[in-house]
Amino acid sequence: MKPMKDGWAGDALGSRLRWSALALGAALGAATWTGCAMSDEDALLRGPQNPIAAQSFASLWLVDGCRGGGKLSFCSTETVEEVLELAIDDPSVLRFAEAEEVPKGLPSDMTHPVVQGLAAGSANVRVRARFSDAERAAEVNVEVVEVDAVALPPACAEAEAPLRVLPGKTLTFNVVPHGGGKPLDGVLPGLVRGEGVTCSGIDYPSRMHCSWTAPLEGGAVELVSDVLPGFRGRLQSYGANDVVAVHAFTERIWESAVGPGWPVRLPTATALKEGIPCESLPVRAVTATPSICTGPDGELAWDASDDDELLVEMLQTGTCKLQLGAAGAATLPSTAEFFMRVVSQATVDHLADPETACEVEGATTCKSFHSTMRCENGRWRDLKSCGSGVCELVGRGEAGCTSAEGCAVCRP
């Protein structure tokens, strides 16, 4: 493979077909529907979304510029058969990497040429290749920025999450170089390292992600950088007594009403002083309103079986109040409360589905706990929604009910 000559005065691309005005209009119409704005003989060289870090490696992607698909598409999808020439217009900024230099996991094949940033600046990359139908060429501009910082966001995508994990568990985090206050793309070996830390995965923006498994007895590891001498980081395990608060997300409770003894699922998360980690501990709860709510088996104090939710059994309509802490911790530093309506067992027993058979013309019943239905022509038909209230079956003489079978009414 020989390099292309410097200086690109002419464009090697361009359509070789001469469309009639009608055919061109049809092609443009098809392009509008398929999202294709390129000729069927174009190629596309895709580069990183952001500038790449100096000394980092990034994978480009050479594809058919107008890929086929869809009934109105005038494109056909062609594949690369041979790369003929590679060129970079400023070799002081960017170079092509040799196969043995490419970091493990970074795409590197005929359609994925890999470049390395050398110094701050901008360079154009151009590739000419033989596709399955013809020769095509494409180019892309790649910007290179010097690294001055590194961020280690956890893979759970919670930007504020601390780099802490439970003993015996694995913490996975991304390694994102920064320059001038902005994130950069590119895989930069040696940007972060530490004892027991493995950095082998590569995600879509050509960024590295690493992992560390905490010892069963707990522990920590210090992180350093071969690129940024002043960088220091720390990965550390945590336990129940490190939890300073429990967040109970009462706004995420999806139930607005339950039947007698039905559990309510309360989403929870344990928080450290640095924030909420990717993986929380199960929660311990003590009810402060035992006549209204208890544990799922009637307990006054109980531990959650999951690390992200607590089961609470509702005994009657009212506000459930709880004291919360991490399971196994010495204290319960947090409280939570939520209101829940508990409908009667009769309401539960008479729930029906729309369009199912009914016997008493004009009778009413509940559809779930949120709307009423009436029996019309032998079928249950939707009557009205209870809005933010709930549907409940009441007996004759209650809430204006005159039916011997009871009536479905909406309660606030």
Image (cartoon, rainbow, N blue to C red):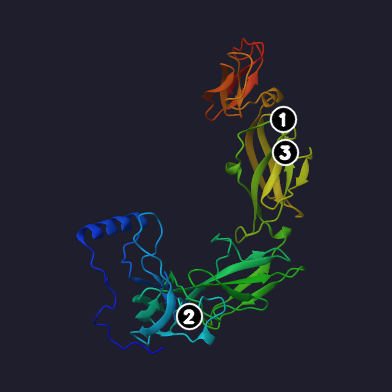
Q: Position of residue 354 (x, y in %)?
A: 58, 26
Question: What's the residue at 73%, 58% (across, down)?
Answer: 240
Percent across and percent down for residue 170 are: 67, 67
Q: Residue furthest left?
A: 21
Q: Amino acid at mark 3?
A: Ala
Residue type at tag 2: Ser
The crowd level at tag 3 (other Cα within 10 Å; few <14, some 14-19, many 20+) is: some
Q: Secondary structure at mark 2?
A: loop
> In the rendered image, which quarter is residue 93 located in?
bottom left
Q: Secondary structure at mark 1?
A: loop
Q: Which residue is mark 2?
A: 56
**Closest to the observer, 46 or 215:** 46
Query: 390 or 326: nearer the eye?
Result: 390
Q: Is residue 228 left or right of residue 348?
A: left
Residue drawn where x is 36% and y is 63% of the image: 75
Residue 335, percent from left and from top: 66, 44
The CA span between labels 3 and 1 is 19 Å
